[in-house]
Amino acid sequence: MLSTRSLFEEIRANDEAFRLLAGTASQNELQGGWENERIAALTSDPTLAAKILRHGDDENKHGRLFAAFLRRRGLVAADIPEHANYCMLLERRGIGLSHARLREERPLSTDEIILYLAHSRVTEQRAAEQVAQMLDCFRDDPELKRGLAMVADDEVNHLSYCHEELLRFRELGHGVLIERTLKRYAMAEIQATRDVSLAFVETIAGILHWPAWKRRLLSLGAQAIYFYERWIGWRRMVRLAPPERPNALGPVQAAG
Ligand SMILES: [Fe+2]
Ligand SMILES: [Fe+2]
């Protein structure tokens, strides 16, 4: 039977396919780590900068963890094919702050901070869902389960933090920019995810010698998800609600 779990099983059982899955995850996490470090360095508000830095530390930790999954199997990360590079596709679609901007030393404006937070709100939603799915599929593997549970827990923190900070900026009168940006970013992210999924299916199909019908079925599945998200699913990515975990990335409050 063709289920998400059976597909992940197939990928885990093949060195080349696992290199692509864990290598892509590792490189995306490290990319997020670098971006957050740079954004923290350009953020004038020290309280917010500390939270962004912690976010970056978490992403770097996730990147190292996925690399460790590979190392334990004697593997190294596969290079991400350019048309399957999620971070690059997002930047090309104008989501978030460009790398050129992050390499400057000029502090970020409030509007740029809001763009960064909207980018995080949308991409952390995706990350939280994808890691939760991986955790569910690999729950019978103690080592993967332990690592992925830690990442999944962190991603809930990151999502909570995005809700909290965007609500704070909305209170400060930036509601129109936040709403407009979230919708634009969600639509672009959905397209980038579709493109990455199609590229991933093509590459994995080649590695695992999938028959044409299986490749076609999975490509159709990626397109179906895209159409669903374009009409209905995008709403979950732009909604702002009181955070599930308040002050998730803030300093630990002293007891008493
Ligand atoms: Fe992460
Ligand atoms: Fe994250």
Image (spheres, rainbow, N blue to C red):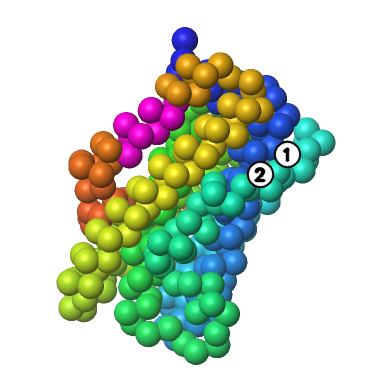
Which residue is outermost to the right? 74
The residue at 43%/83% (across/down) is: 108
The numbered dot on residue 70 is 1
Which span of residues is magenta-colored?
Answer: 218-226
**In the rendering, at what x and y percent does residue 66 appear?**
65, 44
Which residue is outermost to the bottom? 106
Can you say whether 122 is above or below 39 in the image? above
Q: Residue 146 versus residue 97: which sits nearer the camera?
A: 97
The residue at 73%/39% (across/down) is: 70
Give the alpha-carbon distance from disc 2 to disc 1, as whole Å.
8 Å
**In the rendering, at what x and y percent does residue 180 appear?**
22, 66
**In the rendering, at what x and y percent does residue 252 appear?**
47, 64
For badge 2, the amino acid type reads Gly
Q: How crowded is mark 2: few (under 14 residues within 10 Å), some or many (20 or more)?
A: many
Residue 145 seen: no
Can you say whether 100 is above or below 63 in the image? below
The residue tagged 2 is 23
Q: How crowded is mark 1: few (under 14 residues within 10 Å), some or many (20 or more)?
A: many
Dot 2 or dot 1: first in sequence order is 2
Quadrant where the C terminus is found in the figure: bottom left
From the Cβ of disc 1, is ligand 1 less than 8 Å away?
no
Q: Does the magenta stretch include residue 81?
A: no
The total of numbered circles placed on residues is 2
Instruction: Answer with left or right where residue 222 lies relative to residue 141.
Output: left
